[in-house]
Amino acid sequence: METLLTVRELRKTYRSGGGVFSQESEGTRFTAVDGVSFAVSCGETFAVVGESGCGKTTLARMLLRLIEPDTGEVRFEGRDLLTLRGEGLRSQRRQMQMIFQDPFASLNPRMRVGEIVAEPLAIHEPGLSAKERLERTTTILLRVGMNEDGLRRYPHEFSGGQRQRIGIARALILQPKLIVADEPVSALDVSVGAQVLLLLQELQREFALTYIFISHSLPVVAQLATRIAVMRAGQFVEVGPAEEILRDPKQDYTRELLAAVPELPLD
Amino acid sequence: MSGLLEARGLTVELPTTEGWVRPVDEVSLRIAAGESLGLVGESGSGKTMLSLALMGLLPPGARVSGEASLATEGCPKKLTALTEREWRDVRGGKIAMVFQEPMTSLNPVMRIGAQIAEAIRAHHPQLATKEVQRRTIDSLRRAAVPEPDARAEQFPHQLSGGLRQRAMIAMALSAGPRLLIADEPTTALDVTVQKQILDLLDRLRRDLQLGLLFITHDLGVVSQVADRVAVMYAGRIIEEGPAREVLARPRHPYTQGLLKASPTLKRGALTPIPGAVPQLTALPPGCAFEPRCELRRSECAAAIPALRIIDRDHAARCILV
């Protein structure tokens, strides 16, 4: 399978303490992501699982350069993302979009849903006519299971699940190749979370999407992942095909995580 | 087992711009000393409002009807008829609550020990400072907080999420309540920490013979902590019974749907429930789950189904049962 994304020795360190007003110390350094390397093939779902503070969200954001890495390399279709500037970076970015955890915080409350979903088009395809833009916006909104009359309404008029669908529509409107989804269902109710997971599965097949799926929940990841990376303290502890990690984990930490998942009594 | 908490037809009504709504509608439940009841529901099911009603913490303007009584030391107290003065003894002293986010329910500028001491003093003002201190450290130790003396001197932000939740539990139990209400106490925690907290609650319940009302949206969690389970939907209990029974052989279509929609470590078994939880201002006339139910019949929309007994203590609010 063709490789879409290659990450080599990605690293990010933050300074904690020693603020603006502290004169002596530089503070202590905290390494959020500590030399992570992996490759993602076209069409797969690469899941990164870890507990809070393990660095998974920092990693996700560095892939899109929403956070600048200190060192390392991110190659998307062979091009080095970290050296790109201006127009070059912009044209790469439209190929990679993000879905966020909190559907309440990630949508601008003062914009209508139609404007929110169409905004990436305004930035990346400014040549489109208003009619074409509306057409594309309507098509993608219908595809994620929203009604046409949603276009003129505001985010607060929708439930959490519907807002997450709006976020997905915004991520998909530019027809990207890669979607980075950071805890896309952890803020949703169980019955609605399952709807969104199935939608993501359908969309992946339909649009030939590649997913990087960030989550703290092994049961959620188990539904979609083709490969799983288990992350702890900024590093990958174990990486492998999803079934293998879930059935026959090699590392103690992975076993510990699996053992802590509450199980349902099945009849 | 003797009944500790008993609610009959408990109803909470709140005023909204669109008229009165009922987040808790004719709820009846029983918890014995030493028993844990898992209350399961999605957002908007009324599970949190029910717990606030049992704590006397309803928002101003709320109307309560029905009955709820708490039997401690043999004499039942009518919770629904307490004055604010009487509530002050019951709240914390007889019924205590642990919330989802320990960071927002602890005072950030007060040391852990001082916060627990404050809770103890509120219920035992006659105690000497030394004795309050001893009880403070004891309650931290009981909640398995390592180095309780040192932790008592720290501020909430200096503790990890798991330790903060232990401190919350220590504080909740410091005045010796008989009923503990835990509202999603592990939802903000990592799975490995969650397991420790669930084990702790289980041990405390047995050791202290506490009644535990454990509120959660997570069926996996409920199967670990609950003897019995009550499932809430749109303000009503729609299924109730022994935990193993309800989770392994659910009879209400909503409980069945919720189980099929819960991710497990097995892949490909996920079936979502179509639609969304109804708004309380626009409830369907009959069964509240009817619009989302795949087994619905025409009768379902006509009237609210009664709770039907399936087994000795397993019941479901569905005409198909």
Image (tube, coloured by chain):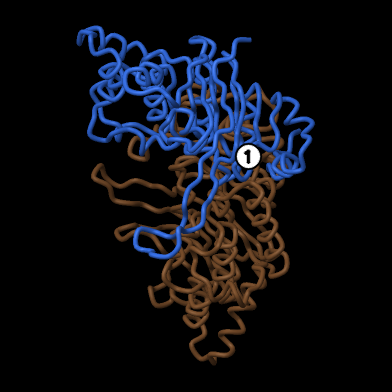
Chain colours: A blue, B brown
Residue depicted at x 71% and y 26%: A240
Q: Is there any visible trace of residue B299 in the rendered image?
A: no
Q: Quadrant of residue B135?
A: bottom right
Q: Quadrant of residue B231?
A: top right
Q: Is residue B243 left or right of residue B185?
A: right
In the rendered image, which residue does mark 1 sit on? A235
Instruction: State the count of labels.
Output: 1
Circle 1: is it few (<14), some (14-19), or many (20+) Cα within 10 Å? Answer: many
- Say which of A91 and A227 sits in front: A91
B315 above or below B69?
A: above
Residue depicted at x 39% and y 73%: B83
Residue A225: give x, y in percent of width and height: 62, 24
Residue A78: give x, y in percent of width and height: 52, 15
For label 1, the SS is: strand
Residue depicted at x 53% and y 40%: B306
A29 above or below A84?
A: below
Residue depicted at x 25% and y 18%: A122
- Say which of A88 and B87 sits in front: A88
Q: Is there any visible trace of residue B67 in the rendered image?
A: yes
Residue A72: give x, y in percent of width and height: 53, 31
- Say which of B33 and A174 sits in front: A174
Q: Chain of mark 1?
A: A
Q: Which residue reaches farthest left?
A: A130
- Amino acid type at circle 1 is Gln
Q: Quadrant of residue B267?
A: top right
